[in-house]
Image (spheres, rainbow, N blue to C red):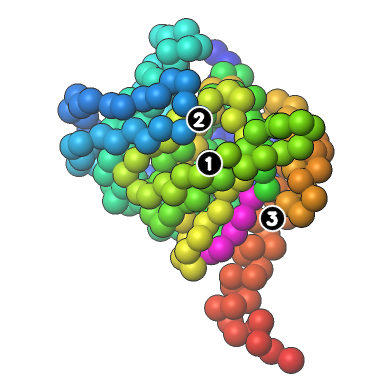
Amino acid sequence: MTGIANATRIQLPAIASNRSAPVSTYSRRDLLLGATMTAVTMTARAAAPRFDIDRFVEDCKQANRAHAHAEAQSAVGEIFARAISNPKAVLQAVGPPERGGLRTLYRSTNLTILNIVWSPLMQLVPHEHKMWSLIGIYTGREDNIFWQRRDGRLAATSASAISPGTVVPLSDDVIHSVANPTEKLTGAIHIYGGDFFAVERSEWDPETLAERDWDIQRAVRTFNESNDRFFGWQKGERCAR
Ligand SMILES: [Fe+2]
């Protein structure tokens, strides 16, 4: 058992938690999954009535264990797509977002499930994962820009606007930056095919696009500064002299 459930060694801004009542069965449905594409939207047609976090985590763990690396993303993605097809149920289970931050729903050496809340207008610098991942939104919107290394520089190659109800799979070698383009909190579930916090990876300076080591503390500051700006705006402090 490699799981370190509900444990995060790194302190990040906490977000609201609200476990729901036990649940549920999902109906089968078709998925569109582009295994080699950087981002292909997966959409489930029918909606599950409710969402239970513990059941969801267990289903994802089981699917991940039962498949080899190449198929694990698709298997977990099917479960994820069925769940996120009812974004209101996910929102009800995790609780309405109150501030930007990150909560680890599950962490092990081969699977990480995060509940991420993006502050209004927050942007996260280009970064890589070095493992497959899946992104699903349950409220708000998340815009992704996808990048590639070209001739020693970073080049933007495509973009994807992700809305509630769909899952976007990202390949092992993806480089992306994330933005919440709305003036509301955006709630997302991100799933990674490894220990998200343990892998050495790169990020890129948002102004110069110079490559540097990914730094979790820098990400923490980004969440905190975004929260400060948002709640400052709410209080009218930004206009104070
Ligand atoms: Fe990412």
Q: Are marks 1 and 2 in contact (CB under 8 Å)?
A: yes
Q: Position of residue 61 (x, y in %)?
A: 44, 20
Q: Secondary structure at mark 1?
A: strand
Horizontally, residue 97 falls left or right of residue 210, namely left
- At label 2, the amino acid type is Thr
Q: Position of residue 70 (x, y in %)?
A: 48, 12
- Quadrant in which residue 71 is drawn: top left
Tell me the magenta residue range: 120-124
Residue 2 seen in render: yes
User: 161 or 117: nearer the eye?
Assistant: 161
User: 10 or 112: nearer the eye?
Assistant: 112
Dot 3 alpha-carbon crowd within 10 angstroms: few under 14, some 14 to 19, many 20 or more: some
Q: Which mark is residue 222?
A: 3
Residue 76 seen in render: no
Dot 1 alpha-carbon crowd within 10 angstroms: few under 14, some 14 to 19, many 20 or more: few
- At label 3, the amino acid type is Thr
Confirm if mark 3 falls within 8 A of ligand 1.
no
Q: Which mark is residue 131?
A: none
Q: Is residue 122 magenta?
A: yes
Q: Position of residue 198 (x, y in %)?
A: 70, 27
Q: Residue at x 46, y 44 (%)?
A: 160
Residues at marks 1 and 3, CA–CA distance in whole angstroms: 24 Å
- At label 1, the amino acid type is Ser
Across the whole image, how many numbered discs are drawn on residues? Answer: 3
Q: Which mark is residue 38?
A: 2
Q: Is residue 112 magenta?
A: no
Dot 2 alpha-carbon crowd within 10 angstroms: few under 14, some 14 to 19, many 20 or more: some
Q: Are marks 3 and 2 in contact (CB under 8 Å)?
A: no
- Quadrant in which residue 146 is drawn: top right
Q: Which mark is residue 158?
A: 1
